[in-house]
Amino acid sequence: MTSIESPRLQDLSVDELYREGGITVRKYGHHLGAIVEGVTLSGDISDATALAIEHALAANEVVFFRGQEHLTDRIQYEFGERIGSPTTTHPTVRSDDNRTLVLEAAASSWHTDVTFIDRIPKASVLRAVTVPEYGGATTWASTTAAYDQLPAPLRSLVENLWAVHSNEYDYAEATQGRHADPKTADAARERYYTEFTRVIFETEHPVVRVHPQTGRKSLLIGHFVKSFVGLKPSETTALFQLLQNRVTRLENTVRWAWAPGDVAIWDNRSTQHYGISDYGTAARRIHRTTLAGDVPVSPQGETSRIRTGDASHFSVIDEPRPLPGFAASH
């Protein structure tokens, strides 16, 4: 992550920071989502613009940019360096440049990215490259809103609960290919799953984590959850579904229909997302750059615990920089 050289920016109000950064931020959904205008994304954006975008992301959990057709994989990566520390492609999935993950199939299951490692990414930058004529939208859900809406007895339960996350799960249920032939789709999923699980990771995370920049609490679950520590499988299944239903209430979501040149950045510490596989056999290509994150911390101040796997080849552990207007940042 490129450092912000001017400490003065940290003392600005949010409105002043957005003005100095040259951006406008317009709400797109009540609990999450905003459209950011006034910026051409690149590695050449100013310190003020970089900090303003990072603030808008933390405040709105997912932000959208239109008209960014100039972006290439290289420029997208260089922009990522201005707002974070880009990771390699994935802990297990390879790519040609070891930077950019090309997504052609929609991950049709609610999840937070890469929660099976200790250093969960803080954010991802997603760029539409090939957009189908219809369908193929992505939906995000606010895990902070889900936590805020829990009744007190459920909060008491989940704040003391831990979950085991693993990359060894039923990927076929979560990913749908675009192949017309079911056998071809099954073979493609099997190849991807073999690569996805070539190294097994398991990590214990708190079910409630505290955001390192905003101080807000959120639910850390999603489809990589294998079990809740201390609970039976049947109890895990029942409680997981109860909590997931809270996260994915339609009122807690925002949906984005992609157009060429669109970019979305989501805060992976406070959201889940779902790729909608409703575009038939049409082509859909989305390029993703991922930004390194910190190790989650529970409300009691305990950090996540590795069971299996070393993710140091994937990313550094991020040291979140302070953001104006948030108590946790001061």
Image (cartoon, rainbow, N blue to C red):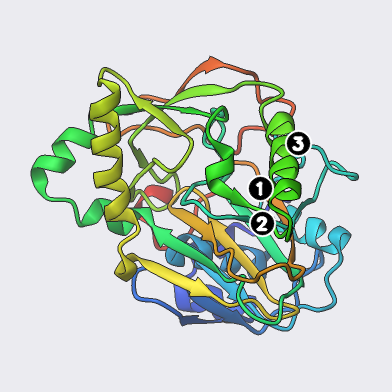
Residue holding disc 2: 83
Pointer 3 and pointer 1: residues touching (CB < 8 Å)?
A: no
- Circle 2 Cα neighbour tier, 10 Å, few/some/many (<14 / 14–19 / ≥20): many
Residue 255 located left or right of residue 328: right
The amino acid type, in three-letter code, at marker 3 is Arg
Which residue is labeled 3 in the image?
191
Between label 2 and label 1, give the one nearer the viewer: 1
The tag earlier along the polypeptide, 3 or 1, is 3
Q: Residue at x 60, y 49 (%)?
A: 175
Label 3: element kind: helix
Viewer-side label of 3, 2: 3
Left or right of 320 on screen, residue 249: left
Other residues around mark 3 within 10 Å, as few (<14) / some (14–19) / many (≥20): few
Task: Name the residue nearer the viewer: 39 or 324.
Answer: 39
Mark 3 vs mark 2: which is more N-terminal?
Answer: 2
Query: What is the secondary structure assignment of the residue under circle 1?
Result: strand
Where is residue 330? Give x, y as percent: 41, 49
Examine the rendered structure and indicate whether residue 317 appears above or below residue 43. above
Q: CA distance from mark 2 to mark 1?
A: 8 Å
Residue 241 visible? yes
Q: Which residue is mark 1?
A: 291
Q: Nearer the viewer, residue 325 or 218?
A: 218
- Whether residue 46 can be seen here: no
Residue at x 29%, y 53% (from the top left corner): 245
SS class, disc 2: helix
Q: Amino acid at mark 1?
A: Leu
Q: Inspect the image, locate mark 2, and give the three-letter code of the amino acid beneath it.
A: Ile
